[in-house]
């Protein structure tokens, strides 16, 4: 029962070993490239989703201060009278 040695294995032939190493290296390189590609794809997918999110905060309208209480309110929500802005109808009337 001395079947520990595999049949057909040439222990003296180094070419098989070099070929195996070359194949292994090729597999590793392919694997690394594949991983890098996946990371890059994932990064691109995330980068595509990011711009609309980061653009929204920049779209905040200009803030203006109420002429009466000096409270800052978005320009589109403020009540305007000439060059002056007011937070509410009450303050608009109070200023006169
Ligand atoms: Zn006010």
Image: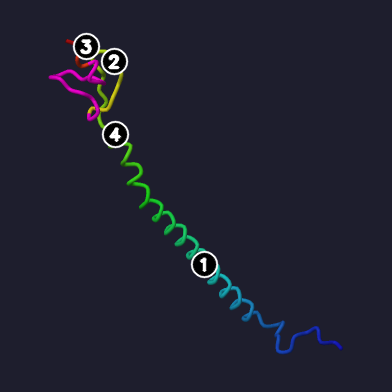
Image depth: mark 1 or mark 3 in front: 3
Q: Where is residue 3, by image quadrant?
A: bottom right
Question: Contact, CB < 8 Å: mark 1 with mark 3?
Answer: no
The numbered disc on residue 29 is 1
Image depth: mark 2 or mark 4 in front: 2
Q: Which residue is mark 2?
A: 70
Q: Residue at x 63, y 81 (%)?
A: 16
Looking at the image, tell me whether mark 2 or mark 3 is earlier in sequence order: 2
Q: Residue at x 81, y 83 (%)?
A: 4
Looking at the image, tell me whether mark 1 or mark 3 is earlier in sequence order: 1
Percent of width and height locating residue 37: 45, 62
Q: Is mark 2 within 8 Å of ligand 1?
A: yes
Question: Contact, CB < 8 Å: mark 2 with mark 1?
Answer: no
Note whether 45 is above or below 88 in the view shown.
below
Q: Which residue is mark 4?
A: 60
Tally of numbered discs: 4
Percent of width and height locating residue 31: 52, 67
Q: How is the image coloured?
A: rainbow
Question: Contact, CB < 8 Å: mark 1 with mark 4?
Answer: no
Q: Nearer the viewer, residue 26 or 76?
A: 76
Looking at the image, tell me whether mark 1 or mark 4 is earlier in sequence order: 1
Q: CA separation, marks 2 and 3?
A: 13 Å
Looking at the image, tell me whether mark 2 or mark 4 is earlier in sequence order: 4
Q: Which residue is mark 3?
A: 94
Image depth: mark 1 or mark 4 in front: 4
Q: CA separation, marks 2 and 1?
A: 65 Å
Q: Residue at x 42, y 59 (%)?
A: 41
């Amino acid at each position: 029962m001395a079947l520990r040695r595999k049949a057909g294995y040439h222990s003296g032939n180094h070419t098989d070993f070099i070929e195996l190493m070359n194949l292994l290296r090729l597999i590793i390189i392919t694997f690394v490239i594949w991983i890098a590609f996946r990371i890059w794809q994932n990064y691109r997918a995330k980068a595509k989703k990011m711009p609309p999110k980061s653009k929204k905060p920049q779209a905040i309208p200009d803030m203006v201060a109420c002429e009466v209480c000096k409270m800052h309110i978005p320009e589109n929500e403020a009540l305007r009278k000439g060059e002056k802005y007011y937070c509410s109808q009450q303050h608009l009337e109070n200023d006169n």
